[in-house]
């Protein structure tokens, strides 16, 4: 089957065409992504109104390019998939409305994809991974540990009670005067820093649940930075190194607990999978490798361009759902919030709206 996927949940405007064979193998025929980093950089973060307008201006051309590069015509499509949430509602509306129009005109099945499900299923796009497996999803809006049991069958084992991991990286970068997007800047600065100069907390360390908390750590960095005036380049590097080291230790601990909970409830996972933009951080990848090695579990991380938001992951999730007979009507709503695990409850202390995506 051939599926067109559209992604507009945040600041990437993307479209792709993916082919899924009957045996579950996949081929990406096109994958066009237009980042809006330049539009948002002057503001130090994503501005929802600017993002929505950019999606309106860009999406038609990106869909046309994805279709042309794939060599597929609209009547050949088996389905059209769009990220229907969670995300910035203006952008979600743009992508979902476009997909509905294509589905209506060409009488093609519509698949309204949960953006988180697309991340969860991406390792099956890049390799023949069988269920069940354990997903660590870390990005600007999400930090979760999820048991991926099958298409449409997910159990959240842990989440953040405040800031998402990528969000914390971006906020630390901003408070230290580093350019946007902040995550790569913090990673780069940390390579020349002394991680032992500052003593930062390791949030949630040793707790029996698998939840994360990064707000207190972020505040600790702000407090230390406030004691130094003016900040010198080495101070910034040392602060970044200390912050990143704390994140790595806390992440390793939280994932170890998550894997233990997975084992207790569902047996041995086929793999530990990492997805989301934070998975591109090389230091975090190293920590994940250590966790997987200790758990004697294979570690799978899709290529960086498939970890961040893209159309291919939406198209693939649509194809996976279509293969088991799951489609949606033209009344499918756009959603700013959409839990992957419908039974999940917000953890105690939950306060950040983005964390509940």
Image (spheres, helix red, strand yellow):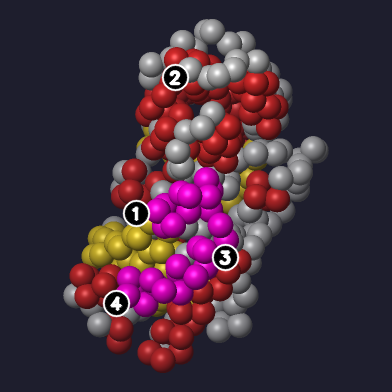
Q: Which mark is residue 32?
A: none
Mark 3 or 1: in front is 3
Q: Is there a contact, CB below 8 Å, between mark 4 and mark 2?
A: no
- State how far apart marks 3 and 4 are (Cα): 24 Å
- State how far apart marks 3 and 1 are (Cα): 32 Å
- Which circle's residue, 3 or 1, is located before the other in the chain? 3
Mark 3 or 4: in front is 3
- Which circle's residue, 1 or 2, is located before the other in the chain? 1
Q: Between 317 and 352, which is closer to the camera in this rendering?
A: 352
Percent position (x, y) of residue 26? Answer: 29, 59
Splitting the image into 4 quarters, where does residue 167 fall?
A: top right
What residue do we see at 25% from left, 64% from top?
Answer: 30
Examine the rendering and report whether any part of residue 210 can be seen: no
What residue do we see at 70% from left, 50% from top?
Answer: 353
Q: Secondary structure at mark 2?
A: helix
- State how far apart marks 2 and 3 are (Cα): 34 Å
Q: Which residue is mark 1?
A: 125
Q: Secondary structure at mark 1?
A: helix
Q: Is there a contact, CB below 8 Å, between mark 2 and mark 3?
A: no
**Residue at the top extreme, as displayed:** 197
Q: Which mark is residue 49?
A: 3
20 is higher (above) or lower (below) than 325: above
Examine the rendering and report whether any part of residue 232 can be seen: yes
Report crowding for label 4: few under 14, some 14 to 19, many 20 or more residues within 10 A (C-alpha): few
- Magenta segment range? 36-64
**Residue at the front extreme, as displayed:** 230
Percent position (x, y) of residue 323? Answer: 42, 69
């Amino acid at each position: 089957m051939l599926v067109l996927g559209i992604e507009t949940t945040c600041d990437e405007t993307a479209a792709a065409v993916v082919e899924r064979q009957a045996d579950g193998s996949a081929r990406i025929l096109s994958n066009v992504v237009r980042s809006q980093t330049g539009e948002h950089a002057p503001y130090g973060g994503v501005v929802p109104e600017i993002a929505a307008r950019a999606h309106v201006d860009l999406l038609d051309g990106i869909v046309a390019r994805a279709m042309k590069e794939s060599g597929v015509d609209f009547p050949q499509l088996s389905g059209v998939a769009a990220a229907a949430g969670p995300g910035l509602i203006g952008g979600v509306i743009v992508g979902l409305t476009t997909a509905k129009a294509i589905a209506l005109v060409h009488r093609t099945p519509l698949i309204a994809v949960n953006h988180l499900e697309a991340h969860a299923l991406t390792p099956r796009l890049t390799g023949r991974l069988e269920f069940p497996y354990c997903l660590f999803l870390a990005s600007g809006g999400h930090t979760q540990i999820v048991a991926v049991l099958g298409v449409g069958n997910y159990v959240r084992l842990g989440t953040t009670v405040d800031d998402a991991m990528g969000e914390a990286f971006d906020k630390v970068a901003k408070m230290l005067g580093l350019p946007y997007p902040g995550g790569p800047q913090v990673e780069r600065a940390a390579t020349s820093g002394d991680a032992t100069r500052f003593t930062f907390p390791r949030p949630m360390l040793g707790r029996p649940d698998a939840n994360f908390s990064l707000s207190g750590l972020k505040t600790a960095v702000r407090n230390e930075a406030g004691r130094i005036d003016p900040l010198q380049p080495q101070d910034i590097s040392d602060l970044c190194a200390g912050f990143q080291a704390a994140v790595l230790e806390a992440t390793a601990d939280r994932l170890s607990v998550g894997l233990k909970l997975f084992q207790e409830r569902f047996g041995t996972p086929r793999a530990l999978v990492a997805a989301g933009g934070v998975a591109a951080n090389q230091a975090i990848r190293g920590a994940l490798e250590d966790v997987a090695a200790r758990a004697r579990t294979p570690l799978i991380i899709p290529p960086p361009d498939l970890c961040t938001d893209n159309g291919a992951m939406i198209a693939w999730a649509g194809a996976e759902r279509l293969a088991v007979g799951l489609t949606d009507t033209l009344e499918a709503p756009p959603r700013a919030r959409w839990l992957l695990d419908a039974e999940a409850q917000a953890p105690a202390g939950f306060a950040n709206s983005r964390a509940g995506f």
